[in-house]
Amino acid sequence: MGIADSAVEVRASGWRTLAALHGHIESALERELVRRHELSVVEFTVLDALSRQDGWHMRMSQLARAAALSSSATTRLVNRLEDRGLLTRVLCADDRRGIYTELTDRGWALYREAAPTHDEVLEESLQSAGDVPELAPLVGFLHQAQPARV
């Protein structure tokens, strides 16, 4: 195995570790968000992304990037959340072809209710992942990389 092959293997191993940590966290989040709030991880991600916007809305393409979904999957997800009364779509005043998505009052309420669950489960998942030898270095890095709180 040459140096280039070693570098590829290191990156591949890092990617596998990251994917394992992601799967560990996502399955715990999915289980608890659905159980406590009838909300999937990707649905929470959309509510969270919208809650962080000035003006509290996003174009559908921005929302697709934030949720790491295709445009068609984003449309289906937004349709479901709109049917549940959690989001609404509005036409862009500057560009009538543009459509924004924003939280409704009901969406805000569910987001505020679910956010503490998300944060609690995320922290618990990171703690338990820290006990797995293969994941511990990555968990340690994530804890060190957190921005200082003001």
Image (spheres, rainbow, N blue to C red):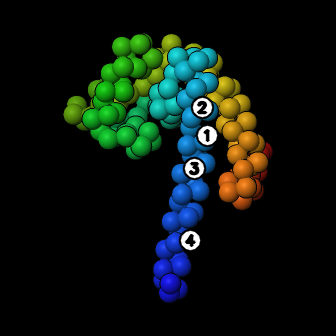
Instruction: Kindly identify which residue carries mark 3.
Output: 20
- Please identify, in this view, whether the residue under mark 4 or under mark 2 is nearer the observer: 4
The amino acid type, in three-letter code, at marker 3 is Ala
| Label 1 crowd bin: few (<14), some (14–19), many (20+), radius 10 Å | some
Q: Which residue is drawn at 56% across and 71% down?
A: 10
Is there a contact, CB below 8 Å, between mark 2 and mark 3? no
Please indicate, yes or no, whether residue 12 appears anywhere in the rendered image: yes
Say whether residue 33 is left or right of residue 70: right
User: The disc labelled 2 sits on which kind of residue?
Assistant: Leu
Of the residues shown, which amino acid type is indicated by label 1?
Answer: Ile
The label number, if any, that marks residue 25 in the structure image: 1
The quadrant in which the C terminus is found is top right
Residue 94 location (% of width, % of height): 28, 35
Q: How far apart in space, not on screen, are marks 1 and 2 (Cα)?
A: 6 Å
Q: Distance between the residues labelled 4 and 3?
A: 15 Å
The mark that comes first in sequence, 1 or 3, is 3
- Residue 48 in the image: state x and y as whole percent: 54, 32
Q: Which amino acid does label 4 sit on?
A: Val
Q: Mark 2 points at which residue?
A: 29
The residue positioned 71% from the left and 31% from the top of the image is 120
**Helix or strand or loop: what does disc 4 sit on?**
helix
